[in-house]
Amino acid sequence: MRQLFLDTETTGLSAEGGDRVIELGCVELVNRKLTGNNLHFYFNPGRDSHEDALKVHGISNEFLRDKPKFKEVVRDILDYVQGAEIIIHNAAFDVGFLNKELELAGQKPFTTYVEGVVDTLVMAKQMYPGKRNSLDALCDRLGVDNSGRTLHGALLDAELLADVYINLTRGQEALLMDVGTEDSQGRSEEAVDLSGLVLPVIQANAQEQAAHAEQMAQLDKASGGKTIWRQLESAA
């Protein structure tokens, strides 16, 4: 499977309000391996960045003066993303901006050209409810080195997102080994499909159930009778 990790930097927060994309970075992953076939562009947006945006990405208006317009390289971008699964952190923001740029360039919406879009912010919120799930927070939580990220940059952020995604999804394919791979001795490994394996369910015995009930009672007492399960029992 070909997956692309994508990030943008913009002049501000509102594509419909006239803000534009100034940087696009994409990192390619094929069969969960980085290929080095990445895409990176800076764009001349035809307008200055807002002061708050400059503080985030640090890309000066002067630096962008001689860069191409988005529409001048749009074909290269669309050829690169064609048919891939796109992975973005807070996808609605980036896709909204890309759709506006494509509209201005006379092209169809972004999702027309790709296999689909995965939002790692949505994934993270499901996996870590109630916690901070910014890219920096996920890097810290998952042990991804983001020490070089003093400012936001589209290509750097896409590279960090690839590492974060690999860590978020680690183990999902562990029950089905690759077919035809070789070990360190050059021996061929056979595919072992464990998807039909039925694991035994071991029920708690009377002593374990009593210990559990005692522990729950202590927790309920410590909370002043405000535990969720006690409230549900009362409501029932």
Image (tube, rainbow, N blue to C red):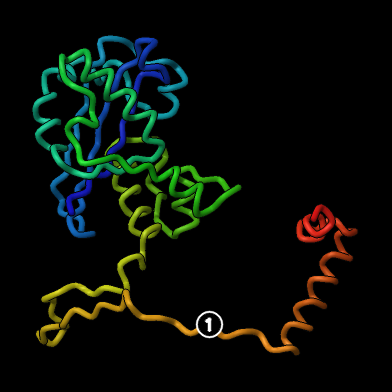
Q: Quadrant of the C terminus?
A: bottom right
Pointer 1 residue:
201
Decide which of 141, 64 is in the foreground and name it: 141
Looking at the image, residue 17 lies above or below residue 119: above
What is the x, y in percent for residue 27?
22, 45
Quadrant where the N terminus is found in the figure: bottom left
Q: How many circles with numbers are drawn on the protein?
A: 1
Q: Is residue 127 left or right of residue 119?
A: right
Find residue 153 and report its horizontal and vertical position in percent. 33, 35
Instruction: Give the image quarter of residue 156.
Output: top left
Is residue 191 shown above or below 173? below
Element type where label 1 sits in the image? loop
Residue at x-position 9% and y-position 85%: 186
Amino acid type shown at disc 1: Val
- In the picture, measured across the screen, residue 45 lies left or right of residue 11, that is left
Residue 32 point in image, percent of width and height:
23, 59
